[in-house]
């Protein structure tokens, strides 16, 4: 789960020593830090240039607000091409709310394949709690993990059932594999509480896969994800991975991450097939995700939470978001908060790279030159975030960047529950299997295992999205450009 939200120095504390500040202070009363010198938000540019510009068809139609769809042309993409030539800043704009929450039951939308992290993993233990994504957070925090399959003897379906035992078609207890699970989530035979549906989730959809796990220290999983694929107007594929991390200090962070992931995913599935440039589509998706999270603060559940917990009155549901789209030879990433995307070449002949910059206290300290990266991330305030999705966010500033890789590789889209154990790009490249492009689900499982082996102090979610560059001479229009 994401760290607590960090307010700007003008409204809360000194960015250098965390001394409380009064509105209007020009200098910190504790350390004398010049508050006017606080680092400005870094420009929205890629952290590394990994490719060349690409031609993109003009968009047609209108967005969901009824206005013409804004587009970017190749010269609008940030970064540099493979020859070192600069590309100008993107011309992004948003003309109104877009998108709506994806249906958890959807497995296909027209030509689009769709999967969301709120789904039950297809290989979940038989007889899991199965309460469904719509009410997965409404029950208690079931602590019991699924037992080792080798230590449990499954009930013989032909045997006569004793009183209290599960009838055919009922939900079986994961502990005794015989008792029926009641509506409160407890086994009527042995009394064990059942694990929550979101404690561990896995999805694989063609060439993209994601895994999310509660971790070893937290009582619930507040992360969520969505993976999907669709077709561009020319029929070529577009593959999407979205990962969200609920803010632990906010109310209902698990619902915030689920709403953001499903909404962002659906907006991308609506806009990409219309010809909207992927970078613009990502921008719209993040704005729509923010609207979805904001909407949670106004509903009945939020009001009830405030009544029972007045200390959280100012902390509306909130989460971070990071997403990646592979489409038409482009790799586009977008984010708000401290969840990250990494690039790892398949053959390891080129350097791996981190494609995102954190919205965090540590990143601000490094940008201002006040601390080295090692010092900043060793500080206890390192993971205080300065950007998030939520009704109490100061200003929504989605970051987006586009790349044109010159070789095949994989994109690792993850929460800090993973990158805390593989922070540098080289560390991530060492942690992911060499055959990640061919086995994305296995690779995501390995990365989650890497975090759990490291301590599993947080929820951990990772999506692995392969990006293929056609071989020279294969007839690709992009290779002929």
Image (tube, rainbow, N blue to C red):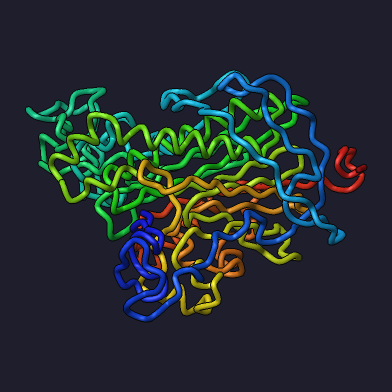
Which residue is rendered at x = 46% and y = 67% of the image?
421
Regarding residue 191, the answer to whether it shows in the image is yes
Residue 413 horizontal/vertical position (percent): 54, 51
Residue at the image point whose x is 14% and y is 27% from the top: 161
In the image, 157 versus 194, the foreground residue is 194
The N terminus: image quadrant: bottom left
Q: Would you place residue 392 above or below residue 269 in this image?
A: below
Judging depth in this view, the residue of 357 and 155 nearest the camera is 357
Q: Position of residue 97 (x, y in %)?
A: 51, 28
In the figure, 253 relative to 158: above or below? Answer: below
Q: Position of residue 42 (x, y in %)?
A: 59, 60
Q: In front: 72, or 480?
A: 72
Which residue sits at x=71%, y=64%?
Answer: 348
Looking at the image, residue 265 sits to the left or right of residue 326; the answer is: left
The answer to whether one can see residue 417 in this image is: no
In which quadrant of the rendered view does residue 31 lie? bottom left
Q: Count the marks.
A: 0
Q: Quadrant of the C terminus?
A: top right
- In the image, residue 263 lies at what x, y percent? 47, 32
- Residue drawn at 18 percent across, 41 percent down: 306
Residue 183 occupies which quadrant of the picture? Answer: top left
Pick the front one: 272 or 106: 272
395 on left or right of 323: left
């Amino acid at each position: 789960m994401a760290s607590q939200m960090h307010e700007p120095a003008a409204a809360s504390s000194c960015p250098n020593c965390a001394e409380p500040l009064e509105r209007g202070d020009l200098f910190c009363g504790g350390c004398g830090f010049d508050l006017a010198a606080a680092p400005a938000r870094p420009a929205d540019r890629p952290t590394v240039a990994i490719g060349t510009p690409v031609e993109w068809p003009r968009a047609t139609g209108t967005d969901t607000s009824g206005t013409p769809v804004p587009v970017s042309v190749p010269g609008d993409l940030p970064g540099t091409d493979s020859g070192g030539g600069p590309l100008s800043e993107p011309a992004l704009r948003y003309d109104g709310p877009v998108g709506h929450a994806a249906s958890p039951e959807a497995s296909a939308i027209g030509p689009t394949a769709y999967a969301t992290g709120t789904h039950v993993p297809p290989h979940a233990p038989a007889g899991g709690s199965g309460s469904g994504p719509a009410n997965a957070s409404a029950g208690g925090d079931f602590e019991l993990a699924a037992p080792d399959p080798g230590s449990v003897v499954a009930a013989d379906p032909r045997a006569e059932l004793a009183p209290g035992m599960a009838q055919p078609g009922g939900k079986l207890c994961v502990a005794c594999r015989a008792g029926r699970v009641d509506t409160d989530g407890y086994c009527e035979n042995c009394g064990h509480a059942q694990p929550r549906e979101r404690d561990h989730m896995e999805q694989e959809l063609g060439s993209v896969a994601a895994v999310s796990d509660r971790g070893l220290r937290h009582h619930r999983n507040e992360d969520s994800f969505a993976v999907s694929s669709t077709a561009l107007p020319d029929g070529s594929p577009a593959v999407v991975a979205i990962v969200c991390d609920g803010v632990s200090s906010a109310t209902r962070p698990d619902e915030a991450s689920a709403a953001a992931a499903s909404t962002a995913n659906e907006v991308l599935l609506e806009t990409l097939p219309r010809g909207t440039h992927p970078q613009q589509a990502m921008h719209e998706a993040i704005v729509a995700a923010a609207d979805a999270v904001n909407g949670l603060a106004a509903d009945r559940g939020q009001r009830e939470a405030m009544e029972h917990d007045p200390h959280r009155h100012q902390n509306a549901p909130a989460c971070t978001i990071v997403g990646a789209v592979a489409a038409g030879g482009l790799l586009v990433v977008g984010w708000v908060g401290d969840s990250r995307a990494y690039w790892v070449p398949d053959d390891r002949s080129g350097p791996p790279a981190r494609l995102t910059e954190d919205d965090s206290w540590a990143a601000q300290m490094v940008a201002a030159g006040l601390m080295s990266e090692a010092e900043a991330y060793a500080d206890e305030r390192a993971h205080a975030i300065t950007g998030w999705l939520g009704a109490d966010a100061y200003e929504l500033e989605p970051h987006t960047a586009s790349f044109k890789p010159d070789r095949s590789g994989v994109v690792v889209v993850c929460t800090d529950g993973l990158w805390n154990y593989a922070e540098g790009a080289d560390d991530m490249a060492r942690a992911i299997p060499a055959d990640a492009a061919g086995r994305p689900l296995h690779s995501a499982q390995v990365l989650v295992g890497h975090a759990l082996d490291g301590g599993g102090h947080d929820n951990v979610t990772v999506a692995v999205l392969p990006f293929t560059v056609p071989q020279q001479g294969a007839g690709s229009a992009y290779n002929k450009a």
